[in-house]
Image (tube, rainbow, N blue to C red):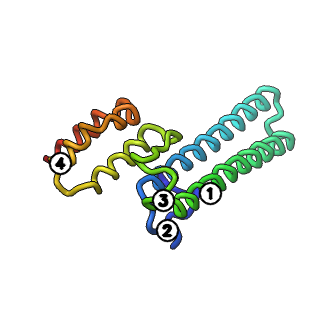
Amino acid sequence: MVIDIIDPDAPEYQNLTDLQYAMIRAAQTEKNDILASAEEEKQKNFLRFLKNNMARSTALADLSAEIDAAAERKVDVVREDLLHRLAYENLYGDDNGTYRYPENPNYNLNFSQRFLVVRDYYMHVTTNPQARLEAYSMDTLARSYLGDYYQTLYDLLSTYC
């Protein structure tokens, strides 16, 4: 996936966490969906104008420009939301932060993002792979928090043993 919703090479984005990268990928996916929807709408309009022998009409160009402007406004909203969430995570992403697994898990994340957060947590809890697997297997919160991804993470952690 090409990331162009923000410049990930900019100095302020050099030390991002897995959660922040997941936020960027989710925002990029949303941007790609918005642009694909706009292109689809423009294509439908073109075919409609073509059917009515108006494909060279300036009305089609004006309509396409309106669709592009609306899509760009939606992308700007997604970008601003991402920047606010990244700034929030930078301010409160330390050990005392608002959303921290397992103290206060973020249920607004999708399951693959939750997987990354929980995996990151257990990878930093201990360097002993067997102790890590045992701690994870006793984690009742992870079972409900990860859903179907629980077994996937268990399998991943067991491969380190």
Give SS at disc 1.
Answer: helix
Whole-Å distance between the Cαs marked 2 and 4?
37 Å
Q: Which mark is residue 84?
A: 1
| Picture layout, residue 9 above or below residue 126 | below
Disc 2 residue type (three-letter): Asp
Give SS at disc 4.
Answer: helix
- Image x and y of residue 71, in percent: 71, 45
Dot 4 crowding, Cα within 10 Å, few <14, some 14–19, many 20+: some
Q: Which mark is residue 8?
A: none
Tell me if 143 is positioned left or right of 113 in this view. Answer: left
**Residue contact between numbered discs 1 and 3, judged by CB atoms under 8 Å:** no
Task: Name the foreground residue: 113 vs 45.
Answer: 113
Q: Which mark is residue 93?
A: 3
| Picture layout, residue 93 above or below residue 1 | below
Residue at x 69%, y 50% (from the top left corner) = 77
Residue hosting label 4: 131
Q: Earlier in the sequence, mark 1 or mark 3?
A: 1
